[in-house]
Image: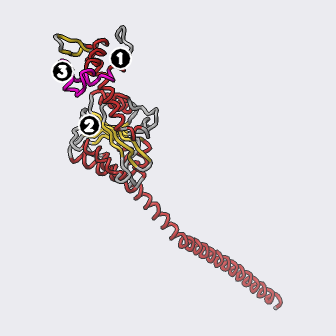
Amino acid sequence: MMAGSDHSLDTIVGKRQSFLESVQKNPKGKCELETDLDVSRSTVDRGIRELENAGLITSTNNTYRLTLAGRTALTAVQQYHRRLQEIDTGRNLLSTLPSDIDIADVFLDGASFAQASPEIPDRIIRHLFESIESADVFRGVSPVALAGYLDEFYTMTTVNGTIVKHVVDEDVVETLLAAPELRSGFIEQARHNRVNLLSCDVSFSYGLWIVDDTEAGVVFYSDTGVRGIIMNDSDTAIQWAHNQWESVMTDATPIDESTLQGAEPDITDITDNSRMDNSVTSTEETTPDSKLDASSDVEINNGITARTQRSIESDSASTHENQATQDEAETRQVQI
């Protein structure tokens, strides 16, 4: 604020922004300002006086132009109003997000916003697909998975020759591999030679993508799908997205064959188990016969033993009988 002025700089610039913008385009005299701004001469005189006292304009031969202070102040107020307009555009989306969400202001500055509509909630996904459909390199972070779009996403990127580097939350990976209707498709994409899938415990709640270092975006989720998307192609926004990506990559590990094979049925195990089951079944089926065969052997052995015992007893009886006959004969001989 200049000495002797009763008004703050932001008040003067806000009030006389149209004057500053008019002389920014090219220097003007009072008559030209009156015509350009469509105001009275008295209004022009008051405006010129206030801006000169604030050191924002200067005159040469009754022609007015911006000072360095005026140019800088005008740029600041223009950026301020532009930023407010951007926030107003995304206000419906931003007002639904947690106040402590770690989205940097540099990513919101100059961003474009898209929010899901209740009538056609899935239309918002097209913004994401349009962003990546012609990408050479796609980097992404997914704390959740939109199962209905996985096949379309990976098909589009692989058909177009895109190199995919995708970090998926470890709980999501476990869920995808455990779901019969999703497992085979996920495994197929994970094995694609242009797809590099990794997993970790993703620390933030929004999805993130970077396309060819030319555009970055974040996805916000709701209980039923996507709540909204913010995209930005400024250098500072892309740098912020890269920083977020690198923070996740620090803890990410590749989803390798051991992870994928652990989710697939093992044919060898199935065969071995089948053989084991057949062996058990065969044993169970033959057990009664085995028992029968053992019983028969016992009966046969018992029969042989019994017959042998009877033979011994018979031989013993015959011996006693012969001995008795011989004794009787000798007795008769003595008597005679």
Taking the view exactly as shown, the residue that stands out farthest to the top is 3
Secondary element at tag 2? strand
Of residues 182 and 8, which is closer to you in this image? 8
Q: Residue at x 37, y 40 (%)?
A: 207
Q: Which image quarter: residue 37?
A: top left
Q: Position of residue 154 (x, y in %)?
A: 28, 47
- At label 1, the amino acid type is Leu
Crowding near pointer 1: few (<14 within 10 Å), some, many (20+)? some
> Circle 2 is placed at which residue position?
211
Asked whether 284 falls inside the magenta stretch, the response is: no
Tell me the magenta residue range. 13-42
Query: Can you say which quadrant of the picture contains the C terminus?
Result: bottom right
Q: Nearer the viewer, mark 2 or mark 1?
A: 1
Q: Residue at x 36, y 49 (%)?
A: 117
Q: On the image, numbered disc 3 is attached to which residue?
A: 31
Q: CA distance from mark 3 to mark 2?
A: 52 Å
Q: Main secondary structure of the magenta part?
A: helix
- CA separation in Å, label 1 and label 3: 25 Å
Give the residue at mark 1: 9
In this view, the residue in front, 248 or 91, is: 91
Residue type at tag 2: Val
Q: Position of residue 248 (x, y in %)?
A: 38, 33
User: Which label lies toward us, 1 or 3?
Assistant: 3
Is residue 200 among what the camera can see? no
Amino acid identity at mark 3: Cys
Q: Is residue 178 left or right of residue 194?
A: right
Q: Is residue 279 visible?
A: yes
